[in-house]
Structure formats: C-alpha cells, structure tokens
Amino acid sequence: MQKVYDTAIVGGGIAAFTAALTAKNLLLDYVWLGERSDKLRLAEKVTNFPAVTGTGADFAAALQAQMEAEGLVLTERRIDGVFRTGGFYTLTAGAENFLSKTVILATGVESKGVCAGEKEFLGRGVSYCAVCDGALYRGKKIAAVISSPKFEEEAEYLAKFADTVYCVCLYPVSCLAGENIVVLHKTPTAVSGGSHVDALLFGEERLEVSGVFFLKNSAPADALVYGIGMDGPHVRVGRDLSTDLAGVFAAGDVTGRPYQYAKAAGEGCVAAHSARAFVRSMGKN
Ligand SMILES: Cc1cc2nc3c(=O)[nH]c(=O)nc-3n(C[C@H](O)[C@H](O)[C@H](O)COP(=O)(O)OP(=O)(O)OC[C@H]3O[C@@H](n4cnc5c(N)ncnc54)[C@H](O)[C@@H]3O)c2cc1C
C-alpha cells in the first residue's frame, strides 16, 4: 500500500518553507516537493522582513541553516500534475507519484507572464514538462520557450527526440548549441492551431511547429491542478487559504499581490493550519 501523507506542500520558496515548518510543528505527516526559488537569492537587500537586514542570499542561507536545524526535508521534484483520486490527491512528478489527504500549493508566479493560447492548448501541443512529454515529439519540429538559463538542460533533452528544437530564449545570452537546436531571441505573442498546435506566433510571423514547451519556474496553477478556481492569474482563496477544491490550499505569490516575503510566509503558516483542520475533519467522518 502506498503511503498517504497528511499534506503535500508544492513549491520551493518562502511560502512553502513556512508551510513545511508549520506542518512539522503541528505534527502533520508532510511531504515537501519543490524546486528551490531563485527569488529568495535575488533581492539586493531585504528591508521589509522581520529580523532580516542583509541580502537575499543571506536570507536564503539563514533559511537553509534553519531547515537543517529543524530537520525539514525538501524532496526536490518538479510536480507536473495534481489530481483527485478516490478520497486523496495524487501528485505526479514524471513517472513518480505521491498521495496526500491535502495539498498546499505554493508555486509562486511567473514574472514573464502567460502567452496567448498557452493554457488553451495545454495537452494539445503545449507542455510544461520536457521529461514527461519530450518523447511524444520524436522526429518533429518543436519550440521551447525558455524563461531562464537554468532550463537549457531541459531544452537539450528535447533535442534528443525532436527533428528541430527552436529555443526561444527570453533572456539575453544563451549557451545552447547543437545540430538540431536553433536559438531565437524574440518574444512569442501566441500559440496557434486547430485541434492541435501548429505554430508559434511572433506578431505576424509564424514558426510552424507541432508542439511548444514552456520551460519556466511556475506554470499557471490551473494547468497544474485540474479544476482549481482562478481569479485572473491567481488562485482564488478564502481567508483560511482554502481553494475551490476541498483539501487544496494555496499560499504566497500564487494567491495574489502583494508579492512580498512577509505575505508569503504568513500565508504558508495559515495554509498549514487549515490543512491540519481539514485532516482532523476527515478523521471524524
Ligand atoms: C529580484 C526580486 C527581488 C525581490 N525582493 C523582495 C524584497 O526585498 N522583499 C520582499 O518582500 N519581496 C521581494 N521580492 C518578492 C518575493 O521574492 C516573492 O514575493 C516571494 O519570493 C514569493 O514567495 P513564494 O514562496 O510565494 O514563491 P516563489 O519564491 O516564487 O517560489 C515558488 C517556488 O515554487 C517552485 N515551483 C513552481 N512550480 C512548481 C512545481 N510544479 N513543482 C515544484 N516546484 C515548483 C518554483 O520553482 C519556485 O522555486 C522580490 C522578488 C524578486 C524577483
């Protein structure tokens, strides 16, 4: 029988960190699944978080030390889907999956935004996961819209299958090279197609492709969690950080502005308390 956690925390920033710390202190059986946030390191100087006076890198180092002192465990995984299965949620990371009674979504927001058609064509030529879907495009021409150099490895992975990978880099300098890799430095305006993707558009210009991979820190939450209610680009939440899906909570930038460490940390804490209340209510049924 596969283990069922009380809560699965998805994300690698301050909201997820605080949710994990609170879950641990509340004695929840948690699994923390995420990729570490760049945003913690990037601040030049943090002046608006209690007791933090240094750079973002100092802040990240202090959190790392606290993780070790408290025995917090981050399982570094990219979650590519969250589904309701029976009484629980299944979270998938490629071929691996995790079962949990509740989910805390702390996946942040993508600063480079969402391209027109990106969400509409999800599963019909648009993907966020090179490892999951790369093999589907064997011998085909595809595009990878890459938001940061750290995703170049995923684009190279796609090149193992595809005829040609057009790497649309949304940052100035790329190290990508390969026989079947074409690097482009321009901003896409839309994904187009009929029943399936047939092109990536740059204004009037069409790049004919069979698929488009968006390789970025945070996919839209409704692309990750089927059926979650949105309020524009953010997850719709109540004061207890509950979403429209029973047992799914959200915290941090993913729930909306202000985009600040203190707001994200506070929401991570509240979301963990709400997850605990939910788990307890399940026990009474
Ligand atoms: C340059 C810069 C400077 C900033 N300076 C300040 C400042 O001085 N003060 C301040 O208050 N705020 C500052 N901010 C804002 C602050 O960084 C954010 O508000 C905060 O980091 C949000 O935390 P979060 O945990 O919600 O999201 P994030 O920090 O964005 O973390 C989300 C994490 O989840 C991971 N993730 C996403 N999807 C998945 C998935 N499917 N599976 C696994 N992991 C996933 C992402 O990779 C990321 O690591 C700054 C932001 C930037 C960009």
Image: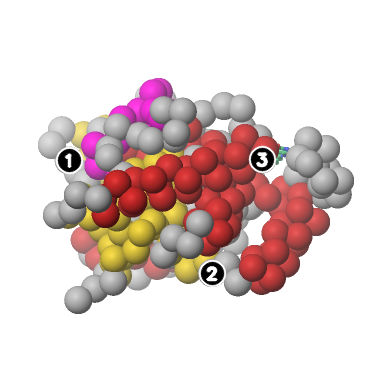
- Where residue 7 sits: x, y (%)? 38, 56
Q: Is mark 1 within 8 Å of ligand 1?
A: no
Task: Name the residue at the right extreme.
Answer: 53
- Ligand 1, by image quadrant, is top right
Distance between the alpha carbons at the discs numbered 1 and 2: 40 Å
Secondary structure of the residue carrying numbered label 2: loop
Magenta run includes residue 226: yes
Task: Specify whether residue 143 is in view.
Answer: no
Secondary structure of the residue carrying numbered label 3: helix
**Disc 3: CA contacts within 10 A as few (<14), some (14-19) or many (>=20):** many
Numbered mark located on residue 73 in the image? 2
- Where residue 200 sits: x, y (%)? 34, 37
In depth, the one of 114 and 91 nearer the eye is 91
> For this view, does 208 lie left or right of residue 10?
left
Numbered mark located on residue 196 in the image? 1
Numbered mark located on residue 261 in the image? 3
Rendered residue at 44%/55% (across/down): 9
Colour scheme: secondary structure
The quarter holding residue 258 reads top right
The stretch of residues the image draws in magenta is: 225-237
> For this view, does 109 lie left or right of residue 285?
right
Numbered mark located on residue 282 in the image? none
Q: Is mark 3 within 8 Å of ligand 1?
A: yes
| Dot 2 amino acid type | Val
